[in-house]
Structures are given as C-alpha cells and as structure tokens.
Amino acid sequence: MKTLKMLAAGAAFAATAALTGTATADSWDMPTPYPDKTFHTVNIAEFAKDVEAATNGALTIKLHTAGSLYKHPEISKAVRGGQVPAGEFFLSLLTNEHAAFGADSQPFLATNYDDAKKLWAAQKPVVTKLLDKQGLMPLFSVPWPPQGLYTKSEIKTVDDLKGLKFRTYNATLEKFANLAGAAPTQVEAPDIAQAFTTGRVEAMITSPSTGANSKAWEFVSYYTDIQAWVPKNIVVVNKRAFRKLDKAVQDAVLAAAEKAEARGWEMSMAETAAKVKILKDNGMTVVTPSAELMDGLKKIGATMLEDWSKAAGSEGEEIMKAYK
C-alpha cells in the first residue's frame, strides 16, 4: 500500500511538472524604482500575475518597489551582474553607456504617443543589440506621459529658468538644464517632495504621473504643458537567468511581456488626462506655453539633437533613418 501511495504521488508530481513545463518552481526577485501606485508598477504587477498564471506557478516574480531592493541607478547593474534576474529602470539612464539609449529623451523629437511608438520601433533593434552585449534582453518598454514643466511661478520665456535649481534624473535632462541656464540637481522620484521642501530644487520637468504622485501642488503652483518628450521605462531580464527557464516558461514570459507592453501604453495614455486633471483639481495652474517659450525650448532641443547624433554615431544614424 505504501509503495502504491508513493507511485501515485510520483505520478501526480510528474503530471504537475508536465503541466508547468518544469519539475521545480522558480522565483525571481525583481526591483523597480517607483511606488506601488505608479501605473508602471501596477502594470508590472499585472505582468507578474500573468506569468504566474500562465506557468501554473512554475515561475513567480516578487516585486521590490520604490527602490527598496536596489536604488534606481543600480538596478540595471544588478540585473547585468546576476544579483537579480530582472528589473525595471528608466531607459535613458543608460545614456552614459551609449547615447542611443537616450533617443526617446531628446527634447521635442517625439512629443506625442504616435511619434513615440514610431521612435520605439526605430530604437528597439539598436537597444536590443546594445543590451545583448551586456548579457541583457529587453522584455517590454512603456512610456511616461509627455513631460511638462513644474515651477513656483509662471515661466514665459527660457530666460525665466536661469538660475533655478532644476531637478534632473538623467544626463540628458542635466544637459537641458545647463543649456537653459538652470542649476541641475539629481533627485529620484521618491525624493521629489523633500527636495522641493528643503530648497534643493525649485523646478522640474517630469510627467503628470510623477507630479500627481508626489503631490506637486504642495510645493509648486504652475504646470506648463510643454510636452517636451515621451520617455520610456524598460523591463529587462538577465539572459543567463532566462535561458535557465524551461522553453514553455520562456514562451509564457515573452507572451506576458508583449501583453504588458500593449497594456502599458494604453495605461500611459489614460494616465495623462487623469493626472493633469488631478493637478488642476488640487489648485495648480495648468498653462499652455507661450510661443516665445516654445521657440526657446525648441532651439535648445535642436542643439541637443545635433550633439546627440554625433555621440550616438552609427547606432544613432540607424535610429533616425528608421524613425524618419
């Protein structure tokens, strides 16, 4: 009888293994830089659920949000080094490694979702090749809403930005601030409110999402809808970790990633209108930028795009040729 029970248990285990595609369950730790309520994080949580459901629990993904496991600038390195199998980060944070990573953060190159999709289609093959050299593979990428300008007083011309302590989060925005005559200061999203409250920063360009999530109305009064660019986050996986998965589980991860990218773009578009409304409802003045301000900002953008094209070399040329 005992032998029969052991055989039955073995048969049940084999059936479960066949169903899940692997005899042992895997669990991945995945760091993300943004709080739980940020739509990017909500989307990734859905991705994790989809993976677990599609693999019948053969792969579970445990999220570590808001930089709790690794700070934002460390996430890509942690995935590359194999400390964690997967992670999310702001794509243009890698601009210091290669300018091509920052194509989507070039001011006034792609300022709406249609153009942003075209730019990602042009950028993705180049990004994939560059990440491959680092032992990484992109799973999906989701944009932020178009970036707007947050200030304590109304900004009517570029000259009004001169001398302001300006929050930055990547090398591209740091250069933008310098060209505008502002004083750049690196501040991550979870620290925005404190940075403004303590006087470390006085102005920023960021999405309506980050503005609403950080309760920008508590420290600034104006949101100028300049729609500067539509930057993206990217979710990547360590290729060694991915190759260790059973083929059926790999396929499930890729299918869930494709679904997450489509869902994330839809979420981003819905987010734009919803979060701008929240800014208004909480007393912020939402301003349509003056022609003079836009002319000045676009001149800065043109200078930056020229410099970026030189720095990005043949990879940048490939992106721009495909985009245009």
Image (tube, rainbow, N blue to C red):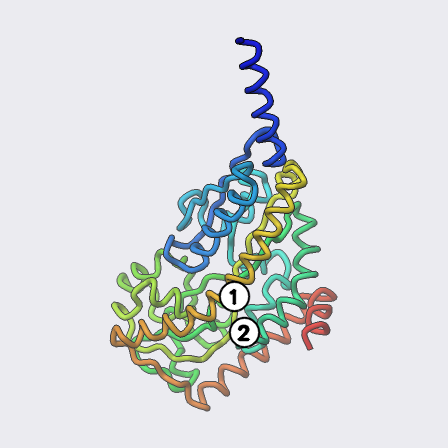
Mark 2 is on which residue type?
Tyr
**Secondary structure state at the residue bearing disc 2:** helix
Task: Determine the residue positioned at 65% across, 41% down.
Answer: 248
Q: Mark 1 sits on what residue?
A: 265
> Along the line of sight, which residue is nearer the eye, 47 or 221?
47
Q: Mark 2 sits on what residue?
A: 113
Mark 1 is on which residue type?
Trp
Q: Does residue 311 appear in this view?
A: no
Left or right, 142 with respect to 128, comes to: left
Task: Determine the residue positioned at 30% across, 80% down.
Answer: 285
Which label sits on residue 38? Answer: none
Quarter assignment of residue 284: bottom left
Task: Categorize mark 1 by other alpha carbons within 10 Å: few (<14), some (14-19), many (20+).
Answer: many
Q: Does residue 58 appear in this view?
A: yes
Query: Residue 41, position in %: x, y?
Result: 44, 54
Q: Earlier in the sequence, mark 2 or mark 1?
A: 2
Examine the rendered structure and indicate whether residue 73 appears above or below residue 243: below
State yes or no: discs 2 and 1 in contact (Cβ < 8 Å). Answer: yes
